[in-house]
Image (tube, rainbow, N blue to C red):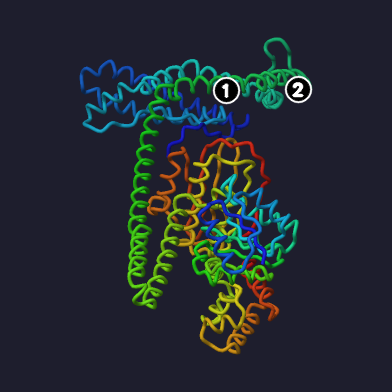
Amino acid sequence: MPNTAEHAVPTAGRLRRIGWQVGLIGMSPISLAVAIISIVFLALSWTWIALPVVIGAVAMTRVLADGYRTVAGQLLGSEIARPYRPRPAGGWSTRLFALAKDPATWRDLAWLWVNATLGFAMVVFSLGLFLAVAWQLLFPVVWSIWPSVFVEYWGVFDITSLPRAVAVSWPVALVYFGLWWRFEPLLMRSYARLARSLLSPTESSRLAKRVEQLAVSRAETVDTQAAELRRIERDLHDGAQARLVALGMSLGMADEVMDRDPQAAKVLLAEARTTTSQALAELRNLVRGIHPPVLADRGLDGAVHALAMACPLPTSVDVDIAGRLPAPVESAGYFAVAEAITNVIKHSGAGKAWVRLTYADGRLALMVADDGNGGADPGRGTGLRGIERRLAAFDGTVVVSSPAGGPTVVTMELPCELSSVKTSPSSGTA
Amino acid sequence: MRVVIGEDLALLRDGLIRLLTAHDFEVVDAVDNGPSLLRSLVTHRPDVAVVDIRLPPTFTDEGLRAAISAREQVPGLPVLVLSQYVEQLYARELLSDRAGGVGYLLKDRVSDIGQFIDAARQVAAGGTVMDPEVISQLLARNARNEPLGALTPREREVLSHMAEGRSNAAIAARMFVTEKAVSKHTNNIFAKLGLPPSEDDNRRVLAVLTYLNGA
C-alpha cells in the first residue's frame, strides 16, 4: 500500500554491530567480485554474449544492495526505501533499456565500489579497534601459554612475569577500549550514511514513485466515489422517490373519493401515512451510509461507541485521542471500523471483540480485534479490500494478523493532523 | 398542560404547535436553538418539553444536550425527544438519571397523532416511552444472551411492548388477549430475567431498559 513515511527500526547495540562488522567483511569479497564482473562485462557488452552476465550481475547487485540497505537502515534507526523503478511492460529490450536508464542501477554499482574501498576500510577499522581491545586483554593469558614467544612487548617492555604482563597490557586495553567506545559508533554511522546516500531513492525517483502511488489511489478513490454516487442515485430512485410518487397517488385518490366514500378515503390516507414512514426509513438508512448523524454529533469516539452498542457481540471500545480529527479522516476511519466489525460479525465466529483507537506521532491507529477462528485472508475478502481502498486515499495502511485458530487483529493506520481541542480519553464496554 | 417546543425547522415547529394546541396542550414557548431551549426549559418548567435532537448553532445533538442539562437543573423535567434517527447511545444517556419522564421517538411517529399525543401525556406523567426501533435494536443485540434467549416469542413480544411504555391493559388490547394473560407473561418475563416484578408502568420500563442496556 502507498506509504512513503520512513519507518523507524530499532537500532542495534555495540555487540550486535560487531556481528555485523564480521558479516560485512565476509560479504565484501562477493561484493567486490560482483562489482568487477559488472564493470568488465559492461565493457564487453557490445559483444552481446556478455549481456546475460551483465543482467545477472545487476540482479545480484540488487540482492546485495538490499542487504546493505537493511544493515544501514538498522544502523541509522530508519528504514531505507528501495529506489527501483517498476519493471515496464514490454519485451526484453524495453526492459533492458529501462534497467540501464534507472539511475538506481548505476548508483548501486557505485556503492559496490565505494563499499569495497572506503566502506571496507571503515568497517575493518571499527572491528579492528574491538579486536585490539580483546587482544590486549588476553595478552597475559597468551603470554603464560607461550612465554618464550611473547617475551617482548612492542619491543619496549620485557615481559618477565604474569603481573607484569597484566600491568603492561591492560592499561593499553583500556586506551583501545576508550577509542573503540568513542569512535566505533561514529564510524559505523558514517558508513551507514554513506550507504544511504547511494542506496536510498534520489529525490526525483522518490517523487516519481509517489506520483505513481497517488495516481493509483486517486483512480481508486474516484472509482469508489462514482460507485457510491450511483448507488445513492439508485437507492433514491427506487426508494424514497418511488414512495413519494405512491404517496401522491394515494392522496390524489383519497381526494377524489372523499365525498363519495369517506371510508375508502380513510383507508387511502392510512396507506399514505405508511408510505411516508417507509420513505423516511429508507432515507434514514441511506443517510447512515453516507455520513452517520452520530458521527457528525459526537465525532469518531462517540460514533464508534454507538457502533459497538449496536454490535450483536460484546464489544469493548477504548479511545485515546486528545482532540478532534479532520472530518474526512473521521469518516474514513468510521467506515473502516464499521467494515471491520461487520467482518467480525459475519466471518469470525467470535464471542467478543475489541476496538482501540489511538493517535500518536501524526498517525491515527484503529485496531479491531476478535477472539474468533482467525484465518482471515486479506487477498480473498472483499471487505478488507474495501477498507484498503477507502484508506488508500489518505495514505492509510491495513495490516491483518489472523493465524488459524485466531485471534484476528486488524490494524489500520492513517497519517493525519489533530486539531487541538482537548477531550479526555474515554473507554467503556458496550 | 404546558409544553415547550424546541425545533429549528419552522415548518415542523408550526405543525407541532398546531397539533399540540388542538389536543389541549398550552404551548408556552417554542424556540429554535439549543441555548434558548435550555433557558426556556429552566424558566418555564413546562409539564412536558418536545425537543428535536439536532438544533442550531452546531446542528449536532444540541437539543439532547440542552434536555439533559435542563434535567440536571430540574430533576425529572419531562422531556420527549424527537429525532430523524434513533441511536442507542442517546437513549442510554437520556435514561441514565433513572428519573423517568423521558421519551425518545422517531420523528415519523408524529404522523400517528393519537400515539404521539399519548406518548407526550405519558412522559408528562413521569412515564418512559422508547421508540420501537430502540427496543428492537436492543432485543436484536441481546438475542443471543442467555436469559433473553429463554423467552418464548410471545414473551418477547410482550417485552417489547412493555419496553415501549405500555401498561398491561394496553398490551392486552394490542395483542388481542386478556389482561390476565399479559400479566402472566410479564411475571414470567420478570422471573426469567431476574428482575423484581412491578406493576408500576414506569418502573417496569426502566427495569427492562436498564436490563437490556446493561447486558
Q: Quadrant of the C terminus of chain A?
A: bottom right
Determine if marks 1 and 2 fall on one subunit: yes
In the displayed structure image, the side of residue B150 where residue B198 appears, left or right: right
Q: Residues within 10 Å of mark 1 (few under 14, many from 20)?
A: many
Task: Specify the label residue A166 is tagged with.
Answer: 2
Along the line of sight, the residue nearer the viewer: B18 or A391: B18
Q: Is residue A344 above or below residue A12?
A: below
In the displayed structure image, the side of residue A255 where residue B40 appears, left or right: right
Task: Specify the label residue A188 is tagged with.
Answer: 1
Disc 1 sits on a residue from what chain? Answer: A
Residue A346 appears in the rendering: yes
Q: Place residue A109 in its image quadrant.
A: top left
Which one is closest to the eye, mark 1 or mark 2?
1
Badge 1 vs badge 2, beta-carbon distance below 8 Å: no
The amino acid marked with disc number 2 is Val
Along the line of sight, the residue nearer the viewer: A92 or A354: A354
Along the line of sight, the residue nearer the viewer: A172 or A194: A194
> Which residue is pictured at 36% across the width and 56% down the height?
A235
Task: Specify the label residue B134 is tagged with.
Answer: none
Q: Residues within 10 Å of mark 2 (few under 14, many from 20)?
A: many
Q: Is residue A111 above or below residue B168?
A: above
Residue B93 appears in the rendering: no
Q: Place residue A76 in its image quadrant.
A: top right
The amino acid marked with disc number 1 is Met
Q: Earlier in the sequence, mark 1 or mark 2?
A: 2
Q: Position of residue A336 (x, y in %)?
A: 48, 49
Assign a secondary structure to mark 1. Answer: helix
